[in-house]
Amino acid sequence: MTMNGATKLDGKVALVTGGSRGIGAAVALRLAEDGADVALTYQGGAELAEEVAAKITAMGRRGWAVRADSADPQEVQAVVTAVAERFGRLDVLVNNAGVGVLGLIGELPLDDVDRVLEVNVRAPFLFAQAAAAHLADGGRIVTIGSCIAKRVAFPGATLYATSKAALIGLTKALARELGPRGITANVLHPGPIDTDMNPADGPDAGFQSGLTALGRFGTGADIAGAVAFLVGEDGRYVTGAELAVDGGFAA
Ligand code: NDP
């Protein structure tokens, strides 16, 4: 916060997908702390999503939790329109919702392949497409990729790595296309982050920690801080970039 009480994202409106828990919840709260009004999507976790929205409201911002299944193109389009209408504008899209499915290539059923590609790839594409119609000059798109897109350090990640690597192409192409409108697009690659998807006390947590340079898991707040940088004023000349926030996993 500055001396006169203005915060960095005052007057901005952000949409965070998958904001009910984990990284998305931390990002939603951080952007609200920095001054933004924040809408967040969820699929099943209504109660948790409402709690995040209530915390945002308690900070004096507008918070809104909306059920929207990333796998449903109609719901994706509808939620973007609804947020822009309700809040009167859209400045920031954080493509965070994702699913982690691991398995050897011979053992991955088509249903899993479809679900992961729908939620992790098609949805960020469709969210960006829908958001591009509303984002103003100075708009920001941040997509949550994965350190696995850069370094596949163990077997069983063909599907997940495929989905996350696709987001690099999406980001670079968005940067080129939206740059003339003053909109940036970046992809952030988290390392192992302590969430429901990847608990720091899970069975292979020690193995994952050992793959990082820092020797430990990160937190949602670690990712949220980097998102805050990318969407804030200091991130204005960063676009088409990949930012690793991974404790050195890819080093
Ligand atoms: P969590 O499983 O803890 O949370 C996932 C979030 O996404 C929840 O809010 C969930 O909503 C939402 N979500 C999942 N599927 C859908 C869907 N179909 N429609 C709408 N919302 C959905 O995951 P993380 O916080 O760990 O992961 C967030 C992102 O970070 C993902 O893209 C993940 O791939 C990526 N990532 C995570 C890493 C980690 O180690 N944790 C490492 C690298 C990348 P609901 O509560 O309703 O289910």
Image (cartoon, rainbow, N blue to C red):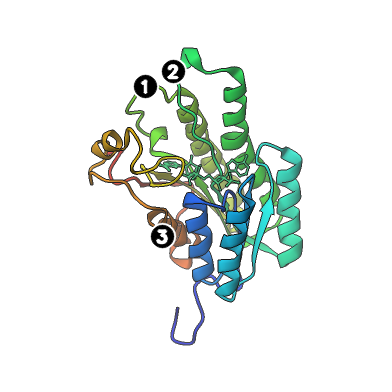
Give the class, few, some or many, for how many residues have Cα within 10 Å of label 2's Cα (few <14, many ≥20). Answer: few
Q: Nearer the viewer, residue 4 or 137?
A: 4
Give the labeled residue for mark 1.
155
Q: Point out residue 251 in the picture as x, y percentages from the top left corner.
A: 26, 39
Is residue 160 found left or right of 243 in the rendered image? right
- Indicate the amino acid at tag 3: Gly
In the rendered structure, find residue 104 and report the number of the disc placed on it: 2
Image position of 212 (left or right of 165): left
Q: Which mark is residue 225?
A: 3
Query: Along the polypeptide, which appears first: circle 2 or circle 3?
Result: 2
Image coords of residue 208 (percent x, y): 30, 36
Mark whose residue sits in front, 3 or 1: 1
Tell whether 190 sits left or right of 20.
left
Q: Position of residue 163 (x, y in %)?
A: 52, 31
Q: Residue furthest bottom?
A: 4
Q: Vertically, is 76 above or below 159?
A: below
Residue 181 seen in the current view:
no
Decide: marks 1, 2 in contact (CB < 8 A)? yes
Labels 3 and 1 touching (C-beta < 8 A): no
Q: Quote the CA–CA distance across marks 3 and 1.
A: 30 Å
> How far is disc 2 from disc 3 in space, using C-alphas?
34 Å
Question: Residue at 49% across / 29% down in the picture?
Answer: 101
Amino acid marked by disc 1: Pro
Q: Earlier in the sequence, mark 1 or mark 2?
A: 2
What kind of residue is marked 2? Leu
